[in-house]
Image: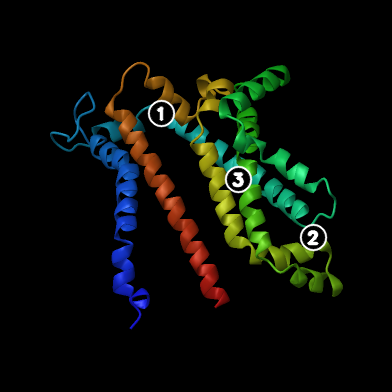
Amino acid sequence: MDMDSDPTVSHLRRLWLYLYCLAVAIFLLAPILVVIPMSFSPSEFLEFPPSSLSLRWYQSLFNSAEWTGAAIISLKAAVLTVLVATPLGIAAAYGLQYSEMGIAKLVRSLLIIPLIVPVIIVAIGVFYLFARLNLVNTLTGLVLAHSVLALPFVIVVVSAGLQRFDINQELVARSLGASRLKAFRTVTLPQIRPSVMSAALFAFITSFDEVVVALFVSRGPSSTLTRKMFTSLRDQVSPAIAAISTILILITFLLALAALASARGDKAQKS
């Protein structure tokens, strides 16, 4: 029997790789495993492990008009960013994927520049432009700025889905009399739905988790949750920050589970 074909031997040879991956996972998850217990501390200061468990800081957050207002602004901005960036990203990805123009690659590179350029540079440019357009400290300006950051993620993810899609299916629908828009809506879009859902999730998280641009274009009543967290850290590092971080972790985890469940449901329907 060939030892290379023995799964036991193969796993033993790869034991170092498994241990390395486990060490990396522990390193990445360690901050989360520390922050969550600290959010249940009754102390005025961060302590780990907490001496006892309490929901004091969660109650303080939900009873605070400033924190709840900032959370509502963040949710509004994230949802509106999804509604703006996702359709635009789908249209751009579709057009660039099947464009026969030689300039398509250049246009794609220009659209994904926000992924390459440091966010602080994007924030300075956005602030300079929005100051002239009177969009600073407005929800509209915040959504537009976040859409600029989210659009490259949507384009990349949807483009990956379109590469796996057989365009001949859409061409058949168009040859039978369907318009290009109807063929895309009824044939192409259902086929790339997992990619669209993932792109929308990326857009939501990009907006909800963003802080650098928000420091420039939002303040006062228009402050986002992450901006308020950042500014609060300058005064006092209280367990309230750990409580907010735990809520954000939970929201991100639930969104990832929802996207995974949707993708599995689509695979089950196709099979």
Q: Amino acid at mark 1?
A: Trp
- Give the residue number, with chain letter if any, for mark 3: 153
Crowding near the residue tagged with mark 3, few <14, some 14–19, many ≥20 C-alpha atoms within 10 Å: many
Disc ID at residue 67: 1
Q: Assign a secondary structure to mark 3.
A: helix
The quarter of the picture where the C terminus appears is bottom right
Crowding near the residue tagged with mark 2, few <14, some 14–19, many ≥20 C-alpha atoms within 10 Å: few
Q: Amino acid at mark 3?
A: Phe
Q: Is residue 196 above or below residue 215?
A: below
| Residue 44 shown left or right of residue 118 in the figure | left
**What distance separates the C-alpha of mark 1 from that of mark 3?**
29 Å
Q: Earlier in the sequence, mark 2 or mark 1?
A: 1
**What distance separates the C-alpha of mark 2 from that of mark 1?**
43 Å
Q: Which percent across, then down, holds residue 133?
A: 72, 21
Q: Earlier in the sequence, mark 1 or mark 3?
A: 1
Q: Are marks 1 and 3 in contact (CB under 8 Å)?
A: no
Q: Residue at x 75, y 72 (%)?
A: 169
Q: Assign a secondary structure to mark 2.
A: helix
Q: Amino acid at mark 2?
A: Leu
The quarter of the picture where the N terminus appears is bottom left
Q: Residue at x 53, y 71 (%)?
A: 267
Identify the image quadrant of residue 46.
Answer: top left
Disc ID at residue 9: none
Q: Residue at x 30, y 56 (%)?
A: 16
